[in-house]
Image: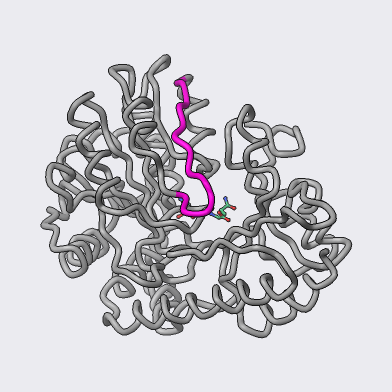
């Protein structure tokens, strides 16, 4: 649980955002948008506070939100989810990740993730005293090797954590990979935790939940969050859907983490989930354009970019530049050039960090003028 600087309790996001704030740098590190989510949805949260939604929400989430989540899963993916038994609202996807790992993973079990991985997976696997096995995603495609995947999942594996679309690489797994994960989960009797918080942030293809693949639903807990789809990262409203037994176990743990949260945000998020398709389409198209803008800017100054298929992150490779040590560069950048980014190696097991040494992750969920200014400053990088 050590931060990249070796200090306990400091995540890389906290550290780099701290540096960005200290030097008033443009923060392309921590992934949060600089534009507000829909105004009508914000107004609903204000109204809910005025109308008295200020005491504990039910432990599973308010019925209106659970219904809206079920309807959303049907509208976009054709999934039939029972709102009373197959949905639980959580304090961000983060809490659902914690609850799922603590509910299912015992000390000594193995958990397989792809690497690089979102930092909270490693932290939770550590807190559960489990063993973290990884399957590497290698540039430039960041697609896993299926043989490596088959070798990583064994009778000791309790859970496979999938993050699709994938933070930090911006890759999207194709259905062949999803189907192999499902097959392995059946073969080795383990659970799939599918973190799909970037489900609506895809640029070329519609998102495919692993729960829609044959045999997938019965083994999978699917997670999402209002933070990503509606630009309300601070509201910390997330949710988990899946088979009743899995959701019941997750909820049992979750009630002792936060019990419940966000009573005024929940009705607002319920309405957000019912926004028309055009909202989601425009949001993704807009973000894709921002990604292109940043990618072109980086490429213009001679930095190689791996173009993302989804999420609001892209990977830049510093190889060939004066300093290709991304950890060093990330720590110097806020002060030297006024831009912050995250070194990819922090999303890897310690022993593998060298494999990602020249890669930097940039967040592009920023206004076009902010990206333009960041690009101008990045010219000083080489
Ligand atoms: N999973 C992934 C892959 C993420 O990138 C993030 C957040 N940035 C989360 C989970 C956490 O989501 P939340 O803020 O809803 O807790
Ligand atoms: N998920 C965000 C990212 O990857 C950060 C979330 C956090 O700060 N914990 O940048």
Q: Nearer the viewer, residue 49 or 282?
A: 282
Residue sticking out furthest to the right = 336
Range of magenta residues: 130-142
* Image coordinates for residue 12, horizontal then vertical, percent: 67, 46
Specify whether residue 97 is painted magenta: no
Residue 370 lies in quadrant: bottom right
Asked whether, in this view, residue 380 is left or right of residue 32, the answer is right
* Image coordinates for residue 87, horizontal then vertical, percent: 23, 50
For the point 37% across and 53% down, the residue is 164
Asked whether, in this view, residue 81 is left or right of residue 1, the answer is left
* Image coordinates for residue 124, horizontal then vertical, percent: 48, 32
* Image coordinates for residue 301, horizontal then vertical, percent: 75, 72
Asked whether, in this view, residue 379 is left or right of residue 309, the answer is right
Residue 216 lies in quadrant: top left
Asked whether, in this view, residue 366 is left or right of residue 121, the answer is right
Please, is residue 82 above or below residue 284 in the view? above
Specify whether residue 139 is painted magenta: yes
Q: Can the viewer see residue 247? A: no
């Amino acid at each position: 649980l050590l931060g990249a600087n070796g200090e306990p309790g400091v995540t890389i996001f906290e550290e780099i955002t701290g540096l960005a704030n200290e030097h008033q740098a443009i923060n392309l590190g921590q992934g949060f948008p600089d534009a507000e989510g829909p105004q009508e949805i914000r107004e609903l949260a204000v109204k809910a506070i005025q109308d008295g939604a200020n005491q504990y929400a039910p432990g599973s989430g308010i019925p209106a939100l659970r219904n809206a989540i079920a309807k959303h899963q049907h509208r976009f993916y054709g999934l039939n989810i029972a709102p009373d038994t197959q949905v639980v609202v959580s304090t961000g996807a983060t809490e659902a990740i914690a609850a799922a790992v603590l509910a299912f993973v015992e000390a000594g079990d193995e958990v397989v993730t792809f690497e690089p991985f979102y930092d909270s997976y490693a932290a939770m696997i550590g807190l559960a005293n489990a063993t973290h096995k990884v399957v590497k995603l290698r540039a430039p495609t960041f697609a896993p090797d299926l043989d490596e995947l088959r070798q990583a999942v064994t009778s000791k594996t309790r859970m496979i954590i999938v993050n699709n679309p994938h933070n930090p690489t911006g890759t999207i797994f194709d259905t062949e990979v999803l189907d192999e994960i499902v097959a392995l989960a059946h073969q080795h009797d383990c659970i799939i935790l599918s973190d799909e918080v970037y489900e609506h942030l895809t640029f070329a293809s519609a998102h495919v939940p692993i729960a829609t693949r044959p045999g997938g639903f019965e083994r999978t807990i699917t997670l999402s969050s209002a933070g990503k789809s509606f630009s309300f990262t601070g509201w910390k409203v997330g949710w988990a859907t899946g088979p009743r037994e899995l959701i019941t176990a997750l909820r049992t743990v979750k009630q002792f983490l936060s019990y419940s949260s966000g009573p005024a945000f929940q009705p607002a998020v319920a309405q957000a989930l019912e926004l028309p398709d055009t909202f989601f389409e425009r949001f993704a198209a807009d973000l894709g354009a921002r990604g292109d803008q940043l990618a072109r800017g980086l490429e213009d100054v001679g930095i190689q970019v791996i173009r993302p298929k989804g999420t609001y992150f892209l990977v830049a490779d510093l190889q060939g530049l004066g300093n290709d040590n991304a950890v060093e560069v990330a720590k110097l950048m806020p002060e030297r050039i006024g831009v912050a980014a995250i070194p990819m190696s922090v999303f890897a097991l310690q022993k593998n960090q060298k494999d990602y040494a020249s890669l930097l992750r940039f967040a592009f969920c920023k206004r076009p003028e902010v990206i333009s200014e960041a690009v101008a400053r990045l010219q000083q990088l080489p």
